Image: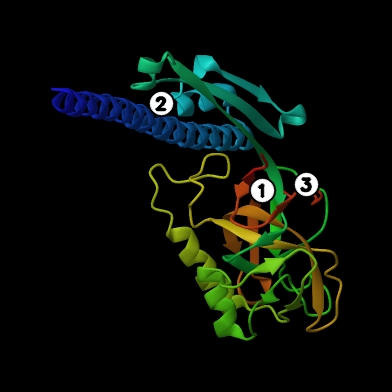
Amino acid sequence: MKRFSFFRNRKGTTLVLHVITFSVIAACASIVVDIGVVAYKKADTVKATDAAALAGAQSIFYGEENPVQTAREYLEKNGVNPDDANIELLSGDKGIKITTKSNVNYAFAKLLGFNGTKVNANATAKVLAVTSVFSGIRPFAIEEQTFEFGKLYTLKEGGGSGSNGNYGCLALGGNGASNYRFNILNGYDGELRVGDYVDTEPGNMSNPTKSSINQLISRCDHCPKCTYDSFDPDCPRIVTVIIADDLDVNGRKSVKICGFASFFLEDVEGQGNKCVVKGYFVKGIAQGELSEAQKDYGLSGVKLTQ
């Protein structure tokens, strides 16, 4: 009898151990699941906060009425309650800072007495001047000066203007009429930086200038047609050009890049050596490197700095 009692007691002990082991494993598994849910929610909150900050900063750049509201809308679209966010504009309207928090309710850890946790995210996006442009620069340079948005400027001079055979044309990636024409129509396909030197393209280049500029202007298929004060950012009439420190050079010479700017192509006027290209100075956004130290010539980018 004692022998059978021993085995019964042993089976009972084993069963208790199995129950305890299973409970521990189940508890650990539930915690792992809830940790995964928290990590997933954290990643989503960070993405939503970053997107809202970038959208708000871009809204600032374009001078829209309420960048804070734009940021709130982006948060809501991405599953974050905007009422749980702190949104503030940076000094001088140079950017936006957002702090968000979201509640995550546990599914399984409640069995252990834990109800949930909070996940937080921070993002700061700034509007910064461009120090390099990856591609798309048109072969024109305008001398450094104080620019005024909405004002008409000459991007290429006609005969009798300019300096010693230079009229504002550039030889980017090569020289000659064919290369010049390609760069007007498509933009230079290389990267250029502030501090780089580029060669001028001497001569009036009237025929390739007139035909190519007219072709660019005709590519605007937006309805209504774009104007300098109301345009699609991707309109072909919006061109990026180089700001040079000095264009008073003789013949084919190197000039230093001190910045980049956007212009809305208005017209190409005149025949022969009187060919002149004019455009309105406008704000633009470009893909490239950005810096707080760079002088702002209206061509900027939006960057997350936190």
40 versus 216 height, above or below: above
**The N terminus lies in quadrant:** top left
Amino acid under label 2?
Gly
Left or right: where does residue 122 sit relative to residue 158? left
> At label 1, which amino acid type do we have?
Ser
Q: CA distance from mark 2 to mark 3?
A: 32 Å
The residue beneath circle 1 is 300
Residue 249 vs 135, above or below: the answer is: below
Which of the 4 image quarters holds residue 4? top left
The tag on residue 292 is: 3
User: Mark 2 or mark 3: which comes first in sequence?
Assistant: 2
60 relative to 9 in the view: left or right: right
In the picture as drawn, the residue positioned furthest to the front comes out as 1
Residue 250: x percent and y percent?
85, 81
Q: Is residue 197 visible?
A: yes
Residue at 72% x, 28% y is 90
Q: Which mark is residue 79?
A: 2
Which color scheme is applied? Answer: rainbow
Alpha carbon separation for disc pair 1 and 2: 29 Å
Near-viewer residue (278 or 253): 253
Can residue 151 be spotted in the picture?
no
